[in-house]
Image: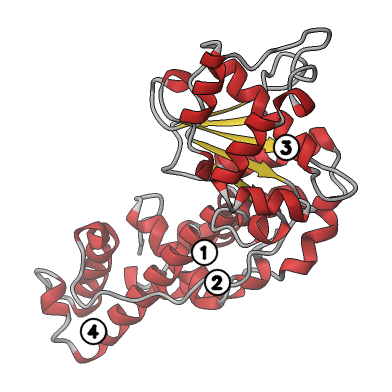
């Protein structure tokens, strides 16, 4: 996925679409916000998309994402007015001042505004010095808002280093953007990373591992007490090792695409695999349980799933998904 692939898509969004796109983007920032909401219309009080950092919402820490989809970069006067507006309403106790303020501007900001953003004290001085020019008559239609001593002091106490701009490069390089690009533009998140297989069998693996141990026991006509005993067997130890590679490959695959697409994509993929192997597992008679395992592995390798993950689903991944079914007890190896 290259940055240039989606520049035009984002630039083609209208004002409302950009806000909805940013709403989805902020919602994807798991672990940062406990709640995200979008304010729109004449009563937004200077807020577009808001991420609340605590259960106290507007009475605690929160971040504002102010979306501006202009045909050119964001001008200084508009930005100063927006900052003036949100600080004015914070001064009026409509909410606390945002702890971080982001101008989401796909086409960026003008050079003068960029200078102000990267020089917070200069930004603060200019909004105070030119309040009458940029803010006094523009925050509320038909009303002149004077910069009296208490409002001036409130603005002086605000930390202007918390104001940032997010342009196309910032948006497209963000860690959390892939599932949003997938949702809006069908972006391909690329191949999943390779898995590392732990040397020691984890407790989370035991359901499918124990099923395999039982299958090996049936094949040999003797009871393997656990997987440690299987590891001493020249043939079955290799077989078990391969199944673990498949299991962990599928685990990384599922987590990667769950994080970078959406839940329905993985669910659809797993559904294709499940239906593709069900009759082989349940509808045929096998010599023993291990024969069932191997027959299902052969069938899984030949399944052609539908959807966006089809060309990323290598043979071991499709086979490993079957072990996930066994681990979840959706599948039992049968004679």
- The image shows residue 150 at horizontal and vertical percentages of 51, 14
Q: Which numbered marker is on residue 237?
A: 4
User: Does the rendering let one see residue 35?
Assistant: no
The image shows residue 167 at horizontal and vertical percentages of: 70, 54
Residue 92 picture quarter: top right
Nearer the camera: disc 4 or disc 1? 4
Q: Quadrant of the N terminus?
A: bottom right
* Residue at 64% in and 40% down: 24
Answer with mark 3 or mark 2, whichever residue precedes in sequence: 3
Q: Secondary structure at mark 1?
A: helix
From this view, report whether residue 213 is shown above or below residue 269.
below
Q: Quadrant of residue 195?
A: bottom left
Between discs 4 and 2, the one toward the N terminus: 4
- Which mark is first along the chain, 1 or 2? 1
Q: Residues within 10 Å of mark 2 (few under 14, many from 20)?
A: some
Q: Are marks 4 and 1 in contact (CB under 8 Å)?
A: no
Mark 3, residue position: 79
Q: CA distance from mark 2 to mark 1?
A: 7 Å
Nearer the camera: disc 2 or disc 1? 2
């Amino acid at each position: 996925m290259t940055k240039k692939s989606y520049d035009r898509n984002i630039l083609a969004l209208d004002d409302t679409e950009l806000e909805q796109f940013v709403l989805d983007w902020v919602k994807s920032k798991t672990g940062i916000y406990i709640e995200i909401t979008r304010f729109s219309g004449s009563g937004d009080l200077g807020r577009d998309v808001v991420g609340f950092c605590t259960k106290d919402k507007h009475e605690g820490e929160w971040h504002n994402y102010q979306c501006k989809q202009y045909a050119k970069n964001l001008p200084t006067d508009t930005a100063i007015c927006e900052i003036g507006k949100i600080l004015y309403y914070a001064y009026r106790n409509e909410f606390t001042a945002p702890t971080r303020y982001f101008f989401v501007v796909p086409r960026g900001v003008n050079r003068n505004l960029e200078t102000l953003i990267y020089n917070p004290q200069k930004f603060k001085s200019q909004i105070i010095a030119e309040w009458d020019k940029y803010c006094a008559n523009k925050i509320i239609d038909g009303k002149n808002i004077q910069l009296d001593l208490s409002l001036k002091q409130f603005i002086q106490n605000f930390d202007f280093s918390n104001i940032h701009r997010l342009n196309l490069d910032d948006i497209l390089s963000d860690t959390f953007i892939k599932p949003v690009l997938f949702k809006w533009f069908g972006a391909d998140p690329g191949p999943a990373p390779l898995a590392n297989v732990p040397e020691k069998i984890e407790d989370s693996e035991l359901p499918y591992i124990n099923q395999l141990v039982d299958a090996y026991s049936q094949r040999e006509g003797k009871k393997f007490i656990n997987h440690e005993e299987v590891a001493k067997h020249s043939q079955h130890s290799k077989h078990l090792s391969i199944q673990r590679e498949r299991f962990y490959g599928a685990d990384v695959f599922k987590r990667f695409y769950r994080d970078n697409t959406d839940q329905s994509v993985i669910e659809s993929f797993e559904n294709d695999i499940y239906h593709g192997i069900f009759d082989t597992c349940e509808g045929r008679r096998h010599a023993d349980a291990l024969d069932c395992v191997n027959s299902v592995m052969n069938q899984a390798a030949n399944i052609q799933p539908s959807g966006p993950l089809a060309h990323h689903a290598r043979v071991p991944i499709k086979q490993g998904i079957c072990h996930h079914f066994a681990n979840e007890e959706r599948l039992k190896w049968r004679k």
